[in-house]
Image (tube, rainbow, N blue to C red):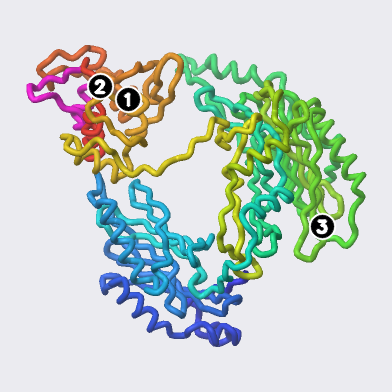
């Protein structure tokens, strides 16, 4: 879709010379729309700066305006997008700075969103908007979806953000094109969901491959074999014809090998009297004694790829996160920019890029020559890695139908099962010239999970379609609004026995239920604080809060948003060094966690003297700084007798009070 955006700050001459279609559709004087918008949203004279732009949608012929108001005194702004038919698709009002917890309730936020909808959606259509979701956090997030005769419109989302402090709608986003005026076909004489299931099974590609997951506890990638629908496959079936509706979903991972390396910082030693080399400096020099020079690294690439012009050569030695030295070499001539990266320890070529590719040609290059070249580069640059791969060939085409590039992707394979996230890629331009070579390969992954006993594709298809339930929906395509069965294949992943698992980490899949509040806090002395925290996005995802029961370290971590993980030794908080916590937390341990999370370690271990003057009972020496800091910052206080009671176990309700203090002090 082509759009034409003109700034109203352009000179009068350019406006007078605008093409006729713009002159006919774009209002030269949008005064009425400005006045209408100001009255609708009560935008007063305090907003003393104003500007606007407009866009002509050549497909619909409609002109849309974006109005921008600003209060110079306080910097607050209001932005509104509105078309010539007074359809409003965007609203954003900046919010003044607030601190602490907001007191607006979910019911009040919902009423605010409903009131806003009554302003921007005609009454005859408002009944077709179905509330879909609500999320709490620093704002209330509320969404509605447009339905026609009970059938959802996929692109018909109306999203709100409501301030938890003022209760105002501060953000609104709707489909750019007004969904109310679109032509929705009647759902008559359509195929059944069961028929759509069968048709989808014929066109989709269910694959059995290795997927990976980064395990924070183990600090590394973990593989798991899984059945899932290949991402290149269409996911919609036309409800009338049974045809697949083509969509493209492809997300390329960042090049783990070729990305900017993280520098290792050697442990700093204080130089002695003569400023001689420290042990770390000497070790760093010795570390580089046996590595390749930049010239040697470049020569390895040139054995396979000719580089005639070495103008403006630049090389830089970096160290990646695995402790390997990498040469980054670039050449910038008048003809092209060429870059490459080579492992300075092993000589393995990680990547190569040439910007001088040609991406349109009437004649196709020889496939076999490109294949031979890709294999030669894979063997020469990647060595043993190349022999554990399987070829996947692809072409990219321009709109005119000509092939613009060719790719030879060699995917890492173990016992016939692909690990798609590790591969060696060689690309050629439209004339068959090498333009890119790179590898994404995790050398730390050696062991692949056993796939013995996998049920096979046919049985997996049956399991898959029990989970991939088709939903009848209106979808927008290049040919207009179509009625289609939409499959949620991206959310379905099966293990080797056909059981549904989480697509991100391979754990057993559980259906998430929307959290609607606790069932056991009414009448509790902590009720109001727990509700206030819940409305601000701080809650435990379970039906009961259990205010008078001891809090576990995991629940404390979840409630406070302090990172931690469960280990065999106990619960480990990231902010506390080398300590594991048992089944329940004491008040001492709570002070230790909060103080460590809030202040620098050197403060806790400094010579500053802390005493137990804040409490009447004696404080254990190892917890003195933590207890003092939590008292000074207002996080924790003692009982009515002025005692801290550090050995006492902390309850969920007491944790809620501490969290309230933590957020408001």
Classify mark 3: helix, strand or loop.
Answer: strand
Name the dominant secondary structure of the magenta segment: loop
Residue 560 belongs to magenta span: no
Q: Give the residue displayed 62% in from the left and 24% down from the top.
A: 323
Q: Do the residues under discs 2 and 3 have CB atoms within 8 angstroms? A: no
Alpha-carbon neighbours of circle 1 within 10 Å: few (<14), some, or many (≥20)? many
Q: Quadrant of the C terminus?
A: top left
In space, the residues marked 2 and 1 are separated at their CA atoms by 8 Å
The x and y percentages for residue 453 are 70, 24
Q: Do the residues under discs 2 and 1 have CB atoms within 8 angstroms? A: yes
Q: Quadrant of the N terminus?
A: bottom right
Q: Is residue 443 left or right of 552 when viewed as pictured?
A: right
- Classify residue 606 by image quadrant: top left
Which one is earlier in the sequence, the residue at label 2 or at label 3? Answer: 3
Q: Which residue is mark 3?
A: 403
Which one is earlier in the sequence, the residue at label 2 or at label 1? Answer: 1
Q: Give the residue displayed 68% in from the left and 37% down from the top.
A: 460
Q: Which residue is mark 1?
A: 596
- Classify residue 72 by image quadrant: bottom left
Q: Give the residue displayed 69% in from the left and 63% down from the top.
A: 241
In space, the residues marked 1 and 3 are separated at their CA atoms by 59 Å
Classify mark 1: helix, strand or loop.
Answer: helix
Residue 643 belongs to magenta span: yes
State whether residue 100 is above or below residue 181.
above
Q: Is residue 557 left or right of 401 when viewed as pictured?
A: left
Relative depth, front residue between 283 and 472: 472
The x and y percentages for residue 400 are 79, 66
Relative depth, front residue between 472 and 584: 472
Question: Which range of residues does the magenta coloring cover?
Answer: 626-646
Alpha-carbon neighbours of circle 2 within 10 Å: few (<14), some, or many (≥20)? many
Classify mark 2: helix, strand or loop.
Answer: helix
The numbered disc on residue 626 is 2
């Amino acid at each position: 879709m082509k759009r034409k955006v003109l700034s109203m700050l352009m000179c009068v001459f350019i406006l007078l010379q605008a093409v006729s279609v713009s002159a006919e559709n774009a209002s030269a004087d949008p005064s009425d729309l400005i006045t209408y918008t100001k009255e609708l949203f009560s935008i007063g004279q305090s907003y003393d700066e104003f500007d606007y732009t407009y866009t002509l949608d050549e497909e619909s012929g409609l002109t849309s305006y974006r109005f921008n108001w600003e209060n110079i005194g306080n910097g607050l702004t209001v932005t509104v997008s509105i078309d010539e038919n007074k359809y409003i698709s965007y609203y954003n009002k900046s919010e003044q700075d607030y601190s602490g917890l907001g007191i607006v309730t979910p019911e009040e936020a919902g009423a605010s969103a409903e009131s806003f909808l009554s302003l921007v959606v005609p009454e005859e259509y408002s009944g077709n908007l179905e509330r879909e979701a609500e999320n709490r956090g620093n704002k209330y997030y509320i969404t509605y979806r447009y339905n026609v005769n009970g059938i959802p419109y996929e692109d018909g989302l109306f999203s709100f953000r409501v301030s938890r402090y003022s209760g105002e709608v501060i953000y609104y986003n709707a489909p750019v094109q007004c969904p109310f005026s679109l032509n929705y076909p009647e759902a008559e004489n359509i195929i059944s969901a069961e028929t759509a299931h069968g048709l989808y099974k014929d066109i989709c590609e269910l694959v059995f491959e290795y997927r990976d997951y980064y395990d924070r506890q183990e600090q590394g990638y973990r593989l798991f074999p899984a059945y899932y629908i290949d991402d290149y496959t269409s996911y919609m079936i036309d409800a009338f014809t049974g045809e697949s509706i083509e969509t493209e979903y492809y997300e390329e991972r960042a090049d783990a090998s070729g990305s900017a390396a993280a520098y290792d910082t050697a442990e700093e030693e204080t130089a002695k009297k003569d400023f001689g080399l420290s042990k770390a400096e000497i070790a760093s020099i010795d570390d580089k004694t046996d590595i390749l020079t930049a010239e040697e690294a470049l020569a390895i690439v040139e054995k396979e790829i000719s580089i005639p012009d070495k103008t403006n050569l630049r090389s830089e030695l970096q160290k990646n996160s695995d402790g390997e030295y990498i040469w980054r070499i670039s050449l910038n001539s008048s003809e092209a920019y060429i870059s490459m990266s080579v492992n300075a320890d092993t000589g393995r070529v990680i990547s190569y890029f040439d910007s001088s590719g040609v991406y349109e040609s009437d004649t196709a290059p020889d496939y076999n020559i490109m294949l031979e070249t890709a294999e030669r580069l894979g063997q020469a640059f990647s060595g043993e890695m190349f022999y554990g791969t399987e070829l996947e060939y692809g072409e990219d085409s321009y709109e005119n139908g000509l092939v613009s590039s060719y790719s030879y992707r060699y995917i890492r394979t173990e016992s016939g099962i692909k690990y798609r996230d590790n591969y060696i890629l060689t690309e050629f331009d439209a004339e068959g010239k090498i333009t890119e070579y790179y590898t994404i390969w995790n050398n730390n992954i050696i062991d692949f999970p056993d796939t013995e006993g996998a049920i096979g594709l046919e049985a997996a298809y049956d399991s898959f379609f029990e989970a991939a339930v088709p939903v009848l929906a209106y979808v927008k395509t290049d040919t207009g609004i179509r009625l289609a069965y939409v499959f949620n294949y991206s959310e379905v992943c099966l293990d080797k026995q056909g059981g549904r698992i989480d697509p991100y980490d391979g754990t057993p899949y559980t259906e998430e239920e929307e959290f609607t509040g606790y069932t056991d806090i009414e009448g509790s002395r902590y009720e109001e604080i727990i509700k206030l925290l819940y409305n601000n996005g701080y809650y435990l995802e379970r039906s009961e809060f259990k205010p008078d029961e001891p809090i576990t370290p995991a629940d404390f971590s979840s409630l406070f948003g302090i990172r931690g993980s469960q280990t065999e030794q106990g619960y480990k908080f990231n902010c506390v060094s080398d300590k594991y916590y048992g089944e329940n937390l004491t008040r001492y341990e709570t002070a230790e966690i909060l103080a460590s999370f809030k202040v620098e370690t050197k403060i806790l271990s400094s010579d500053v003297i802390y005493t137990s003057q804040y409490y009447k009972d004696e404080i254990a020496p190892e917890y003195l700084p933590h207890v003092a800091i939590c008292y000074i910052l207002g996080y924790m206080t003692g009982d009515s007798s002025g005692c801290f009671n550090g050995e006492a176990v902390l309850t969920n309700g007491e944790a809620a009070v501490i969290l309230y203090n933590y957020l408001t002090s």
